[in-house]
Every structure is written in C-alpha cells, then in structure tokens.
Image (tube, helix red, strand yellow):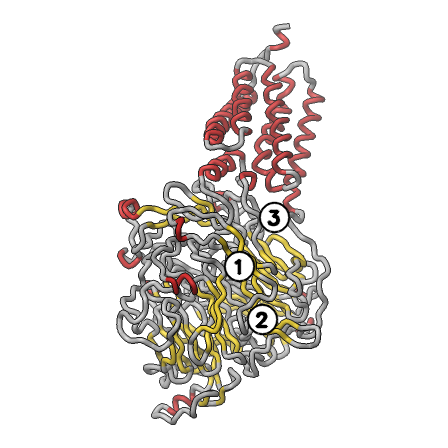
C-alpha cells in the first residue's frame, strides 16, 4: 500500500514542473496574504498554499501531490466561473497560467501517479490543449460588441445646423473650411463617392512630408483645412504648408521660427483658420454689421493682397495672418502681421502660454484662446480669452473667467488674475446668433480647489457662451462642480438643429465630457433638451469642506461604464492581476468623483483621458447619428505634501534647465503645482511599472453610434487592435480587437462611412455606419492621433490624415500628410 502512495523516481521534467509550481505558489501565497490583510479576496492565498503543498509533495515523491494540484485546478476553474461568467478578458489572468500548468501536469500524470495510464493522461492533456486553442482563438472573434439595431435611414439634412450664410457655415461643395469642417463642427463630409462597397479599393493618392519632427513631446494633432484647390496644414513647430489638393505638391511654406523651448505639454497645432470677405454672414469686405467701413490705410495695397488669409496661432503666443495665396505675412494685421497674445499677461515662461487650437472667426471678430500648461504653477499666466478685429488685429475685448462681468481690455502686468481658467481645446461659434462657445477649463492647480475664487468656481469646467459683440457671458453650463480631477472641457462642441413636429427647428449644441457624459443643450440659452440630474457623489479628501455634494449627470446619454470593482482588475497572469487587486484594496475608491488624498492613492474613473477628449464627436446630420469614440481607463492618483515634493526635487518647468532629450511624461506624473499645499502624482491609465500593462481589464477604448432623437446606443464596439501593443512595450503584431486607448476623432461621410485612426495600433480604418463593422484599414507610418478630414477636388473624393504620432500615447513620431482616393476607374 505504501508503494502505491510513492513516486518511484522523479524525472527532470517532474523536477522542473515542481520547481515552477513551487515558485508560483510562493509568490501567490505571499501576495495573497497581503491581499487578505488589506481586505481582499482569499483565492490567491489558498491557491498559492495549494501549489506549494503540491510541489513539496512532488519533491517528497508522494502521489498525493496529484490530488492537491487537481484541487487547486478545479478550485481555480470554479472561482474563475464565479468571478468572470462569460467575460472573456476576465478569464485570461485567472486561468491562463493554471491551464498551462494543467497541460504540463497532465502529460506527467503516469509518472506522478502510477495508477493512471498514458491513455488517460493523453486524453486529459488533449482536452486541456483544445481548451487552450479555443481560448487563443476567442479574442479574434467579436467581444464586447453591441450589434447595430434600428439604424436610422438618411432623411435629408434633418439635423444640419443653421449658423449663418457665410462660407464658414456653408462651405463650398468639397471644401473643409474649419478644424471641424464648418462652424457647426459636425465633421461631416457630404460626399458619396467612397462607399462601404468600394472602400476596399482605396489607394494612397499622394503623400507629403513636412520635415518637422520634434525630438520630444511630439504630437501635432493637426487636421488640415481645404478651400478651393489648396490644402493647408501646420506642424509641431507651427510651420504652415499650402499643398495642391489634387497632388499634394507644395505651393508655399511659412516658418514662424518657434523654438523647442516653447513647446508646452505637446507640440500640438490642431488647426488653422481661414478668413476672407465671404467667411461669415453679417460681414462685407471691410465692414461689420455694427461698424462703419474700415478707412483706407497706408497698407491698403497689402490689404488687397491679403483678401484671403490663413490665421496661425503659435506655441509661443503669437497670432499671425498670412496671404492664403502666397504665404506672405499680411502686414496690415497687428504689428506688421503679428499680434502678441501674451501682452498684459504678466510674467510669462517658455511653453506656458501656447495657442494649440485654431482661433475662430465670428462675424468680423477673431477669438483666440490658449493653453496654460497644467501642473506647474497654480498662479501662472492667466487664461484670459481675447478677441481682435480679424482684419486689423485691434483688440476688441478680453474675457477672463476670474472677472466674468467685464470684457474691457486691461493694461499692465497685473491686468488679469494669475492662474485663471483657460480654454485650451478647440471651440466654435454661431455666426447667426452672434455667440462663441468656449469649453472653459480649470484654474491652474487642477487637483486643489480651495484657492479658487467664487467666479472661478462658477465658470471653470463649463461651456460658456459669450456675446461676440460685447465679450460678455450669455449663458454658462457647468459639467463638473469644484473640480479636482482634471475633468476640464476637452472636446470641441458640435452644433445641430433639432427638428420639431411642425417643421420648427431648435438650435442645439452637443457637449461631450471626459467623464463620458454627453449633454444636448439649447445653444441660445444653455438649457438642456433632455434633462440633467444632480446626483450625490463621494465627499472627503484633503478638502472635504470644498467638495460639492452633487455632480451633474446627463439624462440623454453617457459613455462611462459602471464603477470599478476588484473583479475588474486585470493582468496577463494571476501575479500582475494580484498586484492590481492589492493596489485597488489599498486605495480610496467610493465611485466616480472620489476626491484625491495625501496618505493613500485614490482611483479616478474615468481618468482625465477618459470619455471624450480633444478628438470630439462627429455627427451624421442626415441619419441623426452621433459617432463618439471614447476612452475607458482609470487614473491612480495621490497628492504629495509640499515638503515631500520639494525633497523629491519636483520643480516647475521654468526652474529646470531645458533638456532637448527630455521626452516628457504623462501629464500629472510628478507635477509640482507650485502655489498650493500639494503636488500631485498621477499614474495615467493606472499602469504597472514593470510590464506597462493597465490594471483595468480591456477594452480601454471604443467607438459608438448614438441616436440623436433619444440618446439610444445604435451600435458600440472596441476601437483598436493589439498589433502595436503588448507587455513591456513590445508589439504583439496580433489583430485582436482589444480596444486600445485613443486620441483623435472621426469623420463621417454621406457615403455611409466613418473614418478614424486615433487608436495606438497605427491604423486608419473605415467603419460602415450601418453595421459598426470595419470594412477597410491600412497601416500608418506613424501614430494617427489626429482627426481625419474628407474633401473633394476635381470630382475626386480624398481622405486625409496627418500621421505625426503622439508621445503620451507612445506611438511613433512622423511628419506625414497622407491622402487616399479611389482609382480613376472607380469614380
């Protein structure tokens, strides 16, 4: 009897298996004990103990090792089913290692338990191998997909926005007049040539390389504009290129000589602005609706040469107007063609005041906003918005969210409050209503609110409509109260007109947020068309008295997912999942809007790169569909007391010698926030330091079609494959649609297609708007973190994207402007 309980001899394979099992068990036991100590799940500890016992029994040549391993294996399977259900991605870290161990174990059964035949062993191993093959194939099938249902059919221009009669409101056929296509910023091209049926035939029509490749902080985020036969694009150093729209050949090139030191967080030049006498309604050449004709000047000849203008905002705070035909500076604008936006802003540091989004022209007024770099100084340069006469550069008004009741321009170094809220992202306006819509961000010092004024608390993190003539607020709608999560407005709002039952139209504006809320407001009044609910949210943190007891939630639609649970923690193996579960248990997390703390990490979900960001949404006005790509990732944050931050050497950027090799870091990672009691350390995406994998299970990003009538999800799917992503930063090359982080938006065409890149797999793809399925994709030579655009030239439809990569998204840099079209035989 004793001999039947003994293993006669251990092979080298038995020893290797037992050694691996022992090491795995010890790690699981130690980590599992830690997890139990912080209130977490008992499985890891029990499974670790079982693995250790089984390994020790193998070394002791006891056949009972088989029963202990079988107990751990079956227990793991039951626990996995209980925690995961049919969620494939949850199965991966819970059962992958155990299944591999089971395969090896099954082949060794005859030597570990003499009573088991090789036939039984082989059969069991075959079952396990088959299970592994099925598991390996499953991610190539559609996962986390909401199939298309009741897709609206085209119905004229049911949701087209009436923003005026000028070309910025109604571009000529085939043109792309503004960053978002038109003032409505719907990102819709009324082109039918490329369809889901023939999109597979797209070929690269032309490619242009700008030669502008920054060494650090790359990410142009540029969407070109196209007027007439010319495409205009700008680069990370704000160089402007005019290209032949049919061939991509350079017509002219202007270099404003922006230095590397002026690059803020990212070298973004999202867009350019066009202006001529036909750009806006209410304006004729040299005359606005409410002003007398502009008198002739000594530069009248220059003015005539500059009848069509390209307006450029630079990263070093200059506003420059160029002759659209030649690229020469329009010397009648400002001071010989240039206006200094930073005038009367007090002390300015390199990179702290940067125009990274396209200015907007409403009537005869040029509105300019800027980014004030986050995380450095809580009382850095002010975020004041300035408006100029679009032809002369004369300052008309200046609006500061910290002093919202006046727009009279001020003079002197203390004219505007230091650190007041800025508008860093793209914005738009309504030429007919005479309103400009500003997505107002935080006051500087994103993660501390007690030093903000009452006015800043009211207007920060809001969409605020200003009267274009007076520069004063008409209405303001706040999307986060007393924000300490960097939930500032990131998306450009989109304008639509809602049809009524009797043919009447309601002018509306779509407001997506980082939190994943999508609000639909009357753009005349700021009142919600579908309702907004104030819901209780967690309090506490380091400023409990400053936290708002409620936050707004849209009753129209939201992109955010349910609150995180320990079961949502992920990894490629049980070990890294275990680390994430320990971090989850140790952190403060009470659901969305959990305030940051200083003695432990807090979980912010969605994180500041969650929901909808600067890529914004696209709209198909014929079908009444919103196309929204989104991120679904948490942040792992902690506030760091000032003394500790000083000891760690965290200094604002202006106190650190410029390093041309500094590739930058995730926003908030070791940011000093000088001027408030705490610095901040943000783990963006909540990644593990060794593997680089995210702690939350996939998908991390998706794309969704939403019915504008009622906010219903029409279809939804993950966006982005694993081909350029993997552990340790190594690309897997696998076309698994895991749903990657994404930055950049989409464009919709009347031909029934959604074109988008944005994801970290370096692909640009076409999605059939009726099914939500990818019908074409092609690799890009660099990251596609930009909004594509579609235009028509000489009867041919072109798809264009700027492939420049992005340092934050860890995609490769590039300097490509790329255009695809159908072969002539398909047109």
Dot 3 or dot 2, earlier in sequence: 2
Can residue 536 be seen in the rendering of this structure?
Answer: yes
Q: Secondary structure at mark 1?
A: loop
Q: Quadrant of the N terminus?
A: top right
Element carrying mark 3: loop
Q: Is residue 251 left or right of residue 654?
A: right
Which residue corresponds to mark 2? 508
* Distance from the alpha carbon under mark 3 to that under mark 1: 23 Å
Q: Residue at x 47, y 81 (%)?
A: 275
Find residue 221 and report its horizontal and vertical position in percent.
Answer: 47, 64
Disc 2/disc 1 C-alpha distance (Å): 19 Å
The span from disc 3 to disc 2 (Cα, nearest Å) is 38 Å
The quadrant holding residue 393 is bottom left
Task: State which quarter of the image contains the C terminus.
Answer: bottom right
Q: In this rendering, which labeled residue sits more in front, label 3 or label 2?
A: 2
Q: Residues within 10 Å of mark 1 (few under 14, many from 20)?
A: many
Asked whether 22 or 186 is in front, the reply is: 186
| Residue contact at pointers 3 and 1, CB within 8 angstroms | no
Residue sitting at the far top: 1
- Residue 247 shows in the view: no
């Amino acid at each position: 009897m004793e001999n039947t309980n003994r293993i006669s001899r251990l092979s080298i394979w038995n020893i290797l298996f037992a050694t691996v099992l022992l090491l795995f068990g010890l790690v699981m036991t130690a980590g599992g004990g830690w997890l139990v100590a912080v209130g977490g799940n008992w499985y890891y500890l029990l499974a670790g103990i079982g693995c250790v016992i089984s390994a020790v029994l193998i070394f002791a040549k006891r056949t009972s090792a088989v029963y202990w391993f079988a107990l751990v294996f079956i227990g793991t399977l039951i626990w996995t089913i209980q925690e995961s259900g049919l969620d494939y991605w949850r199965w991966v870290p819970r059962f992958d290692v155990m299944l591999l161990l089971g395969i090896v174990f099954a082949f060794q059964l005859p030597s570990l338990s003499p009573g088991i035949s090789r036939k039984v062993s082989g059969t069991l191993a075959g079952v396990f191998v088959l299970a592994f093959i099925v598991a390996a194939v499953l991610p190539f099938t559609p996962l986390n997909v909401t199939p298309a249902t009741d897709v609206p059919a085209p119905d004229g221009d049911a949701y087209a926005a009436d923003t005026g009669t000028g070309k910025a409101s109604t571009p000529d056929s085939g043109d792309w007049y503004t960053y978002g296509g038109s003032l409505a910023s719907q990102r819709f091209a009324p082109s039918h040539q490329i369809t889901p049926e023939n999109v597979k035939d797209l070929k690269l029509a032309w490619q242009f390389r700008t030669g502008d490749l920054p060494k650090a902080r790359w990410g142009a985020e540029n969407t070109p504009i196209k007027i007439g036969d010319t495409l205009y694009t700008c680069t990370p150093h704000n160089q402007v290129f005019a290209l032949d729209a049919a061939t991509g050949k350079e017509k002219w090139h202007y270099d404003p000589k922006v230095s590397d030191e002026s690059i803020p967080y990212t070298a973004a030049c999202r867009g350019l602005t066009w202006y001529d006498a036909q750009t806006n309604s209410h304006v004729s050449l040299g005359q606005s609706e409410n002003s007398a004709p502009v008198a002739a000047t000594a530069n009248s000849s220059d003015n005539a040469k500059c009848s069509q203008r390209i307006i450029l905002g630079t990263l070093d705070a200059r506003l420059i107007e160029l002759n659209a035909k030649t690229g020469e500076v329009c010397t009648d604008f400002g001071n010989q063609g240039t206006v200094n936006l930073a005038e009367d802003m007090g002390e300015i540091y390199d990179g702290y005041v940067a125009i990274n989004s396209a200015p907007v022209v409403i009537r005869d007024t040029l509105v300019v906003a800027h980014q004030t770099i986050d995380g450095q100084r809580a009382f850095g340069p002010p975020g004041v918005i300035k408006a100029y006469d679009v032809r002369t550069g004369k300052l008309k008004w200046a609006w500061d969210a910290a002093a919202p009741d006046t727009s009279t321009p001020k003079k002197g170094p203390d004219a505007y409050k230091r650190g007041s809220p800025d508008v860093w992202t793209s914005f738009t306006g309504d030429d007919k209503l005479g309103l400009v819509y500003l997505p107002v961000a935080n006051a500087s010092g994103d993660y501390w609110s007690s030093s903000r004024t009452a006015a800043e608390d009211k207007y920060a993190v809001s969409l605020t409509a200003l009267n274009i003539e007076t520069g004063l607020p008409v209405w303001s709608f706040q999307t986060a109260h007393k924000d300490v999560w960097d939930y500032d407005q990131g998306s450009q709002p989109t304008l639509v007109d809602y049809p009524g039952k009797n043919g009447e139209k309601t002018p509306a504006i779509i407001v997506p947020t980082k939190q994943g809320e999508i609000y639909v407001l009357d753009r005349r009044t700021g009142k919600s068309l579908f309702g907004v609910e104030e819901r209780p949210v967690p309090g506490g943190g380091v400023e409990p008295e400053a936290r708002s007891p409620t936050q707004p939630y849209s009753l129209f639609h939201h992109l955010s997912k349910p609150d995180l649970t320990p079961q949502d923690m992920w990894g490629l193996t049980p070990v890294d999942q275990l680390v994430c579960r320990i971090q989850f248990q140790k952190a403060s997390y009470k659901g969305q809007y959990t305030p940051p703390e200083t003695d432990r990490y807090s979980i912010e979900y969605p994180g500041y790169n969650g929901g909808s960001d600067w890529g914004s949404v696209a709209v198909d006005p014929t079908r009444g569909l919103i196309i929204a790509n989104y991120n679904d990732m948490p942040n792992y944050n902690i506030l760091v007391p000032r003394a500790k931050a000083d000891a760690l050497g965290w200094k604002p950027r202006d106190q650190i010698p410029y390093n041309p090799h500094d590739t930058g870091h995730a926003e908030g990672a070791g940011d000093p926030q000088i001027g408030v009691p705490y610095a901040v350390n943000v783990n963006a995406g909540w990644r593990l330091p060794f593997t680089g994998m995210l702690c939350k299970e996939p998908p991390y990003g998706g794309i969704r079609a939403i019915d504008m009538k009622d906010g219903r999800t029409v279809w939804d799917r993950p966006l982005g494959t694993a081909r350029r992503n993997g552990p340790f930063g190594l690309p897997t090359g696998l076309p698994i649609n895991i749903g990657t982080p994404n930055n950049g938006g989409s464009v919709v065409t009347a031909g029934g297609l959604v074109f988008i890149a944005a994801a970290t797999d370096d692909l640009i793809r076409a999605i059939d708007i009726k099914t939500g399925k990818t019908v074409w994709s092609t690799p890009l030579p660099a990251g596609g973190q930009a909004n594509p655009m579609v235009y028509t030239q000489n009867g041919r439809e072109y798809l264009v994207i700027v492939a420049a990569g992005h340092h934050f998204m860890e995609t490769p840099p590039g300097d490509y402007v790329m255009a695809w079209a159908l072969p002539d035989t398909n047109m």
